[in-house]
Image (cartoon, rainbow, N blue to C red):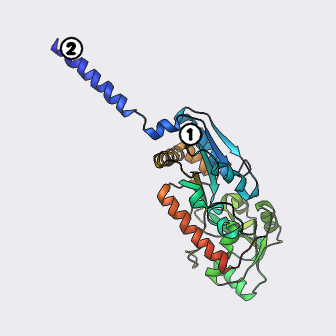
Amino acid sequence: MTHRRTLLALTSLLALLGTTAHAQTAAEKQLASDKFTLVAPFPAGGPIDVLARILADGLGKRYNQVAVVDNAPGAAGNIGMERVKRGKPDGHTLLVIPAGNLTINPTLMPKFPFDIQKDFVPVAMLAKTPNVIVTNTKTGIKTVADLIAQAKAKPDTLSYASPGVGSGLHLAGELFKSQANVDILHIAYKGTPPAINDVLGGVVPLTFSNLPTVLPHIRSGKLVAIALTDSARTPTAPEIPTLAEEGVPGVVVPSWYGLLAPAGTPADVVAQLAKDAAEILGQPAVQEQLKGQGLTSWDIRTAAFDKHIRDETARWGKVIKERNITVE
């Protein structure tokens, strides 16, 4: 009898421990209470859309809830940002957004309609991709030293293409010019495809671009990779040096993407979402999916992410003012 009672007591204890181990926190209960909407304020198919769909799938499975992606392009991302700003601050309406909307547009746009610090809560950094300087093979430029030498030998005759005035890639070019002390004419296009096409065709000699976009052209020999605008080489193309390695430090400009929630979202819910995002993006299958898109997960959460946004906003604000960059 005593032995039987001991077994019953032990079974009850194990059951209790099992219940405790799987008990949901208040934040998890809150997140499991309703469907998720992840707003992607740019057209489907790009990195924003890819990240939003990965997160929607992961959050939906974790909380046994419907999770949808709301592609809301327009007004340089402002339409989607407005939807999230007005969303209920309960953790179910989330914004997947690129760096430029958070750190460049507030300074660049005279009538920018948001206060990033007051209208949103930074949840987590999601992923980044390196940018690279590439040139047409006809230029004869193969290294950063070649680029600087040609720019100094013929001031204001060398030019670079960008996807548009005030884009992160435009500002990467301006930062490079400042750090390398060279003059290179900026030519703005309406998007990445026409900019790349004109570099391929020799209309413009070089451009700053996301590595995944131009890597096929580098591999085929149609474009020459000069250097990465990142802090370290990338496993995707380890043969390409960084600008710092080539003697031009201070031009660390990867393209990155973050997750935000409406202002007023409870701190414990934000922390749980940050943890969920890191775990979802850290899964081996997801890592492979990101790699296929030229992306690397970047786990910077809440307070550290908030500081990164502030620091980058200050950095780009200085570049915008020093280089007198304006948009209509």
Q: How many callouts does the rendering have?
A: 2
The single residue placed furthest to the top in the displayed view is 1
Find the residue positioned furthest to the left. Answer: 2
Q: Position of residue 173 (x, y in %)?
A: 68, 73
Q: Which of the labelled discs sits on residue 58, or is there none? A: 1
The residue under label 1 is which amino acid type? Gly
User: For this rendering, which residue is in front, 259 or 138?
Assistant: 259
- Relative horizontal placement of residue 53, taking residue 310 as reference (left or right): right
Query: If the image is split into quadrants, where does the N terminus sit?
Result: top left
At x 53%, y 48%, the residue is 265
Q: Is residue 244 above or below residue 13?
A: below
Vertical order, 286 against 82 (above or below): above
Q: Quadrant of the C terminus?
A: bottom right
Residue 187 appears left or right of 292: right
Q: Which residue is mark 2?
A: 4
Question: Mark 2 belongs to which amino acid?
Answer: Arg
Q: What whole-number distance in Å separates the C-alpha atoms at marks 2 and 1?
A: 44 Å
Asked if marks 2 and 1 touch (Cβ < 8 Å), the reply is no
Q: Measuring 61% from the left and 34% from the top, which residue is drawn there?
A: 66
Q: Secondary structure at mark 1?
A: helix
Q: Residues within 10 Å of mark 2 (few under 14, many from 20)?
A: few
